[in-house]
Image (cartoon, rainbow, N blue to C red):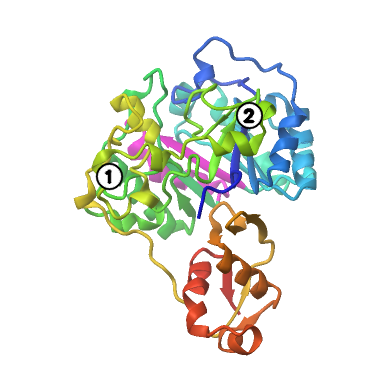
Amino acid sequence: MNKIRSPISVQYEITEGCNLSCAHCYNSFRFDGQTSSDAQLRPEIIEEIIRGEVFHVVITGGEPLVIPDQVLQSIRALKRANVMTNINSNLTLLTPEIARELKESGLNRVLTSIISYDVKKHDFQTGKEGSHQGTIRGMEIASNAGLPVSANMVVTKDTVEEVYTTGKFAANLGVRSFNATRVAPSKDRRSIDLLLGREEAESMLSQLNRLKDEFGMNVATLNPIPYCFSDNSIIYQGLIARGCSAGSGSATISPNGSLRACQHGGNGEGENILEVGLEEAWRIAPVYKRENLPEVCEPCDENVRCGGGCRESAYVVGGERKSQDPLCRGPAKAIHVHQERTIEGDEVSFYEGITTREEEDGGILFRNPGSLAILPKTEYELCLALASLGSFKVSELEARLGIESGDARPLLNQLYTQNLLREV
């Protein structure tokens, strides 16, 4: 299938302003002396996102809650267009009134950062005393307003041994979804000394699995990790299966409307959607895992999914986006991490709330950022026909649609694996 006509998911940096100064921050505008929190909201950016039929938007920054009125205005517009919307916030500025308005506006979920369970370490990394207490207070306010809260820990060499303890701390606060993500170095190389090595990355993932086993938490890591990073990669397949989606499924839009494929890339690297439109800016944006694939990864059977890990980490460390990810060991060490589930019963149905988008040579089914399928035309049209049936029996497909059940099984298993289809 050709490149889809617009992103599935967009990170919209609604402001450059932030009330904290985190040591691991990757946003280049934090270091160029031009950070501003008083820029006027540009509703035409939201309008262009809606026009492009983007499925999912994360409102981020900077810190979005330095301009709460503009955030609320954006969420309401996206909700009217049936766009799933999350917010990425440190939550230190959240008040009960703002939380209530966020809930009423249709906000789906909040993602916040817990750098460490340790108050002093958290406050030191954010550059502001009291930020740890402020984030915890904000999490409580959000939860009391009925907003689901996920937490992300940016993991560095200094904090890698604290992933389990910090996750446990989050679990005791009522957090059910916890991410631990290796630090992405900023372009000015300020955080390059904080990067994880292979053993440290494995320790991070091992602690996530322990949190899942002991507390039943939904765990993930948000920065792609090469499939070949460890001899034990198969143990972490559920965590590292996400490859680089920059330019293939996701993009970031800056406060002035410029689009870049990767959120960690510098501002001004792409076209402005207000000048050329979202679909055109997206069309010419690079697909990182294809156009920046390192030579060492070319023979690998998994390179289409994996993409060689994080291209921005490779860029900062190696000098080029085609450089090798610091965790990459090469094709001989790669594993197949995608394990397909098989439907055991006969009667199945699609989950509720799935939205669709037609493409030139196929279409997309979307339930949430972790449950979606990009399908060629024949399979997409079949899914539309199946969805119209409500629940259906696989054994009756031939009678109802003229399709042999055996011919449909691979597609149905794929949809089942991607949590778009469920057994009744």
Could you tell me which quadrant the C terminus lies in? Answer: bottom right
User: Is any part of residue 56 visible from this angle?
Assistant: yes
**Residue 309 part of the magenta-drawn span:** no
Give, as a single range, the part of the protein colored magenta. 149-175
Q: With 372 as the anchor, is 328 left or right in this view?
A: left
User: What mark, if any, has residue 325 been given in the picture?
Assistant: none
Residue marked by disc 2: 92
How busy is the neighbourhood of tag 2: few (under 14 within 10 Å), some, or many (20 plus)?
A: many
Residue marked by disc 1: 297
- Across and down, in percent, residue 70 comes to 76, 29
Q: Which residue is drawn at 65% across and 36% down?
A: 278
Find residue 121 and report its image quarter: top left
Q: Is residue 376 above or below residue 62?
A: below
Farthest residue in the top direction? 33
Q: Which of marks 2 and 1 is nearer the N terminus?
A: 2
Q: Which residue is drawn at 68% across and 58% down?
A: 355
**Residue 165 part of the magenta-drawn span:** yes
Q: With 302 as the anchor, is 276 left or right in this view?
A: right
